[in-house]
Amino acid sequence: MTILDDIRQQYPQYADVPDGKLASAIRQKYYPDADPTEFYKKAGLYHLIDANAPDNGAPAANGLGTDLQNFGAAAGKTTLDTIRGAK
């Protein structure tokens, strides 16, 4: 279990956000001066560093996800935000 799994348990709206995007957002918000490679190593997110890592459903090697993954994540977040706003 990685830190991203913990965050997704606390914040289910991030369930469809690719690992690379979520980890990058966390790093930029809370650790803006941290080297991305070192941050991913310390967080145990080696699949975001090693482009030769086996692809077992992980996002693209650059950690950004495909266009389809990004579209799906944005659509899901928009829907949840709209529902929450209507309440």
Image (cartoon, helix red, strand yellow):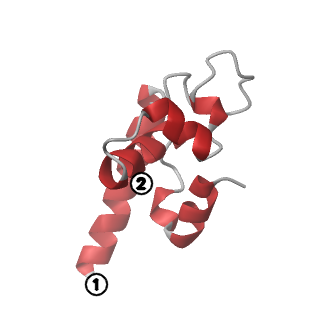
Given residues 74 and 25, the one toward you in this image is 25
Label 1 sits on a secondary structure element that is loop
Q: Quadrant of the N terminus?
A: bottom right
- 62 left or right of 4? left
Asked if 30 appears above or below 51 in the picture, the reply is below
Q: Report the Cα–Cα distance between label 2 and label 1.
A: 17 Å
Q: Residues within 10 Å of mark 2 (few under 14, many from 20)?
A: some
Given residues 46 and 62, the one toward you in this image is 46
- Mark closer to the chain start, 2 or 1: 2
Q: Is any atom of residue 58 visible in this view?
A: no
Residue sitting at x 41%, y 27%: 67
Question: Which residue corresponds to mark 2?
Answer: 76
Q: Quadrant of the C terminus?
A: bottom left
Label 2 sits on a secondary structure element that is helix
Question: Which residue corresponds to mark 1?
Answer: 87
Asked if 8 appears above or below 61 in the picture, the reply is below
Q: Position of residue 26 (x, y in %)?
A: 40, 51
The image quarter in which residue 36 lies: top left
Asked if 49 appears above or below 17 in the picture, the reply is above
The image quarter in which residue 46 lies: top right
Q: Position of residue 30 (x, y in %)?
A: 35, 55
Residue sitting at x 37%, y 65%: 80
- 31 left or right of 5? left
Q: Position of residue 76 (x, y in %)?
A: 41, 54
Residue sitting at x 61%, y 64%: 6
